[in-house]
Amino acid sequence: MTGVLFLSMLILLIAGVPIAFVLCGSSALAILYSGEIHPAIIIQRMFSGSGSFTLLAIPFFVLAGNLMSAGGISRRLVNLCNSFLGHVSGGLAMVAVVTCAFFAAISGSSAATAAAVGAIIIPEMLKHKYDRNFAAATIASSAELGVIIPPSIGLIQYGVATGQSISDLFMAGFLPGIFICITICIAAHFLTKKQGFVAAEKASGAERIKAGKDAILALLMPVIILGGIYSGLFTPTEAAVVAVFYGLIVGVFIYREIKLSDLRSIFRDSVLTMSTVMLIMAASSIFGWLLTKQQVPQAVASAFLGISDNKYVFLLLVNILLLIIGMFCEAGAAMVILAPLLAPVATLLGVDLIHFGIIMMSNLAIGMMTPPVGVNLYVVCDSAKVKIEGMMKYLVIYFAVLLFDILVITYIPGISLLLPNLFK
């Protein structure tokens, strides 16, 4: 039964079947092959797996991100960052990175971050003679912060799959996200220093104050949402609902950049995105149930421990595995498949599961800027009118920087666990 499950999953993946149908289809084939389990269990498990209160946070955060993007938030964040960084060498590249970090704290999505920030900052970089491929590569690499800096849809999926606190995972993602943001900024600075790109004019104090006032409501959103979660005022799911109402009020009544006629397309796009994620979560529940029933996690644990019972070697092997899988599988799907398999092994070896969640998310996030499945690449290719092969010389450098970041995050757990331990 286990052989049929994995063989059918592999065949469906190679055939290019959408991941939700891969999980559901391979599970159905395995159940039919065994003849020991009634097929009705598929529907029962899919409904029970998608009925979690915590999972409600995903559609609401998706909707909140779309509302804030359409409401002019991303443009105001770009203007604010540009007023402080635009005049230095490689300033606009660093503006792109920092804006992605800010927008990540609003959208929770890597692709949404790449689309919202790229559409605004890439044309500005081109005006100042930045290389088109460099601009696209910078956005594609830094947009991965969308799934690391909270709120993160990927961390919600990990929390549900492993039973870990979403609030603790959100807190754990902050410092690693900031660390990655800083290292990409440094890389962007040195890449542009000798390229002859034209820096923007230095903003005056009055212009910076104006940009700050204009962006204050955008900056308050993550403060209100995450502050409410960490203070215990509301749960992550309730915070997502607050984010929707905040984005709606700011976009429609304060910034007035969202018309009532725009809401239909915003809701439609949000439904399409969230339905994909929720279908994957539902399908993963029956897949995960079969894995548990067949004691696959125990087999995986034995296999890893057979190689080495040293947790540092285990973490290195996990990093390699996730980097490879992230290149071929969407991050959310990889998370719901692999987290239940790898987390028990991590527990046996004494790895904190909150820290392990950040390790998994950081690795899978890199897959969003690496071919052939890197969704960020396709988003920025459309915005910058470039091809992936043209970006490769810059992507390789950013990839090396991100590999360094992963090793630091993996072997210095304090970066991830400082805030969760501080607020316990």
Image (spheres, rainbow, N blue to C red):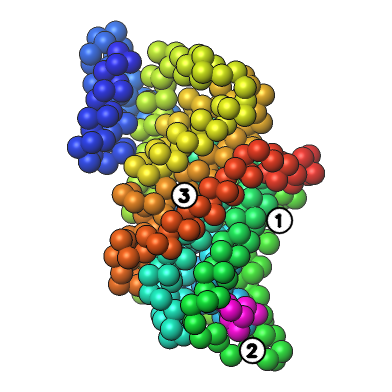
Point out the tag, 2 or 3, that comes first from the N-terminus: 2
Q: Residues within 10 Å of mark 2 (few under 14, many from 20)?
A: some
Residue closer to the observer: 291 or 415: 415
Query: Image point 60% across, 55% down: which residue?
Result: 180
Image quarter where the C terminus lies is top right
| Span shown in magenta | 84-91
CB atoms of marks 1 and 3 within 8 Å = no
Residue 417 percent coordinates (x, y) = 71, 41
List x then y, in percent, for residue 300.
46, 19
Q: Which amino acid does label 2 sit on?
A: Ala
Point out residue 297 in the picture as x, y percentages from the top left corner: 47, 19
Q: Mark 1 points at which residue?
A: 227
Pick the residue in front: 299 or 116.
299
Indicate the amino acid at tag 3. Answer: Ile
The answer to the question of whether label 2 and label 3 lie on touching residues, with beta carbons closer than 8 A, is no
In front of the other: 396 or 152? 396
The residue sitting at 75% across, 44% down in the picture is 418
| For marks 2 and 1 on the same chain, the one whose residue lies earlier in the sequence | 2
Q: Residues within 10 Å of mark 1 (few under 14, many from 20)?
A: some
Check the image and name the residue furthest to the left.
15
Q: Relative to 149, does residue 79 appear above or below in the rendering?
A: below
Q: In the image, is 141 to the left or to the right of 269?
A: right
**Compared to 308, does 88 lie above or below?**
below
Give the SS element for disc 2: loop
Give the amino acid type for the residue marked by disc 1 in the picture. Gly
Task: Name the front one of labels 1 and 3.
Answer: 3
Q: Which residue is drawn at 26% across and 35% down?
A: 13
Q: Which mark is residue 366?
A: 3
Instruction: Pick the quarter of the image with the N terminus.
Output: top left
Q: Nearer the viewer, mark 2 or mark 1?
A: 2
Residue under label 2: 203
How far, Cα to Cα, is label 2 from label 1?
A: 31 Å
